[in-house]
Amino acid sequence: MLTRIDHIGIACFDLDKTVEFYRATYGFEVFHTEVNEEQGVREAMLKINETSDGGASYLQLLESIREDSAVGKWLAKNGEGVHHIAFGTADVDGDAQSVRDKGVRVLYDEPRTGSMGSRITFLHPKDCHGVLTELVTSRPEH
């Protein structure tokens, strides 16, 4: 069962400049940064608020570190902007199977490691009305 909007992923050309915009404009501070070599991105998670299920909601800013990464290709085609929406769930495996059973294409056969040690999978945007959708199970301490 999906419990919250975990994060909104925003693709950007310059992570540091984009972080500074969100800090200066809205007062959002960086909660976590990392480089995800598998996905070819450098990212910053900006915490927006805590949620009633013990999780949080974030903006995830994504800068490509390789032109051939999914975010790199997306930036080349679309420029900066909203890349995906992620819904939090206690059971990414079960929820991925549930939507798969309803005819939605799940992009990974098995969930992968995402930000802050989470488990993630993506749903095909053509099956989600043009929106790349991510399912996320956070590590308990996040």
Image (tube, rainbow, N blue to C red):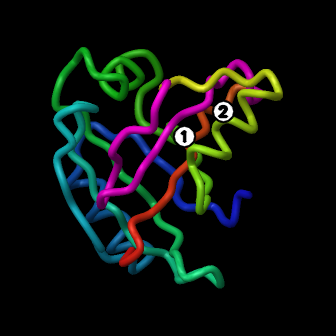
The residue that mark 2 highlights is 131
Q: Secondary structure at mark 1?
A: strand
Q: Residues within 10 Å of mark 1 (few under 14, many from 20)?
A: some
At horizontal 66% and vertical 32% (from top left) the residue drawn is 131
| Residue 109 image position (x, y, % from top left) | 49, 24
Residue 5's quadrant in the figure?
Answer: bottom right
Quarter of the image where the N terminus is located: bottom right
C-beta proximity under 8 Å, tags 1 and 2: yes
Residue 4 is drawn in which quadrant? bottom right
State the residue position of label 1: 84
Q: Position of residue 76 (x, y in %)?
A: 35, 18
The residue positioned 37% from the left and 68% from the top of the image is 46
Which of the pair 18/121 is nearer the observer?
A: 121
- How far across and how far down the image is residue 116, in percent? 30, 61
Residue occupying the point 50% across, 57% down:
137
- Residue 100 is left or right of residue 89, and the answer is right
The relative height of residue 113 versus residue 28 in the rendered view (above or below) is above
Tell me if 28 is positioned left or right of 38 in this view.
Answer: right
Query: Quick one: 67 or 52, which is closer to the camera?
Result: 52
* Residue type, mark 2 in image: Val
Foreground pick, 99 / 15 = 99
Residue 113 falls within the magenta-colored stretch: yes
Residue 105 colored in magenta in the image: no
Quadrant of res 142: bottom left
Numbered range of the magenta stretch: 109-129
* Labels 1 and 2: the sequence-earlier one: 1
Badge 2 element: loop
CA–CA distance in space, label 1 to label 2: 6 Å
